[in-house]
Image: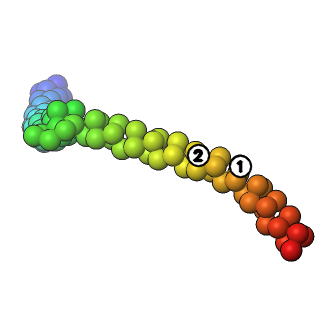
Amino acid sequence: MDKDLEEFTEDLMLLINAFITDTTELKEVLVRVESQLESLEEDVSYINKVVRDGNGRQPLMTRIELIEQKLDDQEKQREKWWKVWVAAVPGLLALITTGTFIL
């Protein structure tokens, strides 16, 4: 029975040592995760500052909206010129063809 008690004590000590080792490793992992989260928070706050707040310039979202508006304006201008060409080319071709037949 004394031998069983010694084996139980040794096994219990091994389990406790393993638990302490695992707990220590887990604490180290948690410290690394916490450090990475802090770094991530800093990065996200910087991105928010640049994208949303502008960081001393116009916010990035506003600049993108201005670019989109300019592109839309250019597209509308192109459509107008395309309509002019579609309307003018048949007339010009008619003038040229009737002019060549008259000569």
**Mark 2 neighbour density, 10 Å: few (under 14) some (14–19) many (20 or more):** few
Compute the Cα span from label 1 to label 2: 12 Å
**Residue located at (40% from left, 38% from top):** 69
Give the residue type that dot 1 points to: Ala
Name the colouring of the figure.
rainbow
Q: Is residue 17 above or below residue 92?
A: above
Q: How many marks?
A: 2
**Residue located at (22% from left, 32% from top):** 52
User: Considering depth in this image, is 5 or 60 the residue closer to the camera?
Assistant: 60
**Residue located at (44% from left, 45% from top):** 71
- The residue beneath circle 1 is 87
User: Considering depth in this image, is 91 or 15 the residue closer to the camera?
Assistant: 91
Query: From this viewpoint, is residue 4 visible?
Result: yes
Q: Position of residue 70 (x, y in %)?
A: 39, 43
Q: Secondary structure at mark 2?
A: helix
Residue at the far right: name it: 101
Q: Position of residue 80 (x, y in %)?
A: 58, 45
Horizontal side of residue 75 vs 94, given as left or right:
left
Q: Secondary structure at mark 1?
A: helix
Q: Quarter of the image for the C terminus: give it.
A: bottom right
Query: From this viewpoint, is residue 37 visible?
Result: no
User: Considering depth in this image, is 80 or 24 the residue closer to the camera?
Assistant: 80
Residue 21's disc is none
Q: Quadrant of residue 43?
A: top left
Contact (CB < 8 A) between labels 1 and 2?
no
Q: Quarter of the image for the N terminus: give it.
A: top left
Give the residue type that dot 2 points to: Glu
Q: Is residue 33 above or below residue 86?
A: above
- The residue beneath circle 2 is 79
